[in-house]
Amino acid sequence: MFFQGKAHKLGAHIDTDAIIPAKYLVSTEKEVLGRSCMAGIQEDWVQRISPGDIIVADKNFGCGSSREHAPLAILGAGIPVVIAHSFARIFYRNGFNMGLVLLEIGDDVHQIDQDDHLKIDALKGLITDQSKDLTLSTAPLPEFMRDILSKGGLVNYVRERLAA
C-alpha cells in the first residue's frame, strides 16, 4: 500500500460536521459527498486538492458524530489516506470500515507542512516527506486491516468471506 501526494494541513479537533456538513448529506455515494468534503472548514476546500493528495491533521481528527459519510467524503474527494496526531475512536473504526487508510504519528505530525510532498509505505509504516528529506515512522498496518482495506472496506471484505 503505497501513496504519494501533496499534504493538506488541518488543525486539531476537526469534527465530522466540518468534514461533511449535514446539509450535504443528500447521498451515500462517495463521489457526491466528495464534492463537499471539508465544506464545514472552507466551502471551496475540495477545489484545491488533486486525487491522491493527503490530509495531515492534528489531534482528535474525526471527532463528533459517528456518521460514516465523513470517511466516504474524504475518499470521494480523491484522498486515500489521512495522517494525524490522533483520531477520534469512532472515526478511526469507520475510516477503515469504509476503506480509508488512517495513520497516527503523534507529535511528528508537526514536522509536516502544507504542500509538502509525501510518500507513504503503509505496509512498513514509513512516511517520507520528500520536501524535507525526512522519514517518519508509524506502526505498520496489521494484516487484518490491510485485508479489509484491500477489499475496499468491511462490507466488501465480509461479502467476499461469506461467498467463500
Image: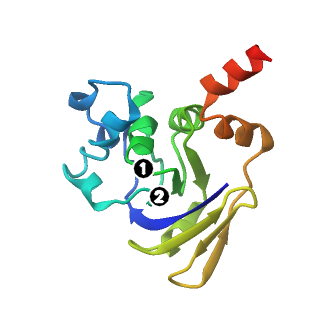
Q: Residue at x 38, y 71 (%)?
A: 114
Q: Residue at x 61, y 81 (%)?
A: 134
Q: Residue at x 49, y 70 (%)?
A: 110
CA separation in Å, label 2 and label 1: 6 Å
Q: Residue at x 72, y 22 (%)?
A: 160
Numbered badge on residue 52: 2
- Counting from the top left corner in percent of width and height, residue 104 is at 60, 54
- Counting from the top left corner in percent of width and height, residue 39 is at 24, 45
- Counting from the top left corner in percent of width and height, residue 22 is at 26, 29
144 relative to 132 in the view: left or right = right
- Look at the picture and state if 147 lies above or below 55: above
Q: Residue furthest top?
A: 162
21 relative to 69 in the view: left or right = left
Q: What is the quadrant of the N terminus in the image?
A: bottom right
- Residue 64 visible to an observer of this rendering: no
Residue type indicated by callout 2: Gly
- Look at the picture and state if 129 lies above or below 20: below
Residue type indicated by callout 1: Gly
Which of the colour schemes (rainbow, by chain, secondary structure, one colour) is used?
rainbow
Foreground pick, 45 / 18: 45
Kindly indicate whether the residue at mark 1 contacts the one at mark 2 (C-beta within 8 angstroms). yes
Q: What is the quadrant of the C terminus in the image?
A: top right
Q: Residue furthest bottom?
A: 133
- Counting from the top left corner in percent of width and height, residue 151 is at 66, 34
Q: Quadrant of residue 72?
A: top left
Which secondary structure lies at badge 2? loop
- Residue 69 visible to an observer of this rendering: yes
Numbered badge on residue 78: 1
Sequence-wise, which precedes: disc 2 or disc 1? Answer: 2
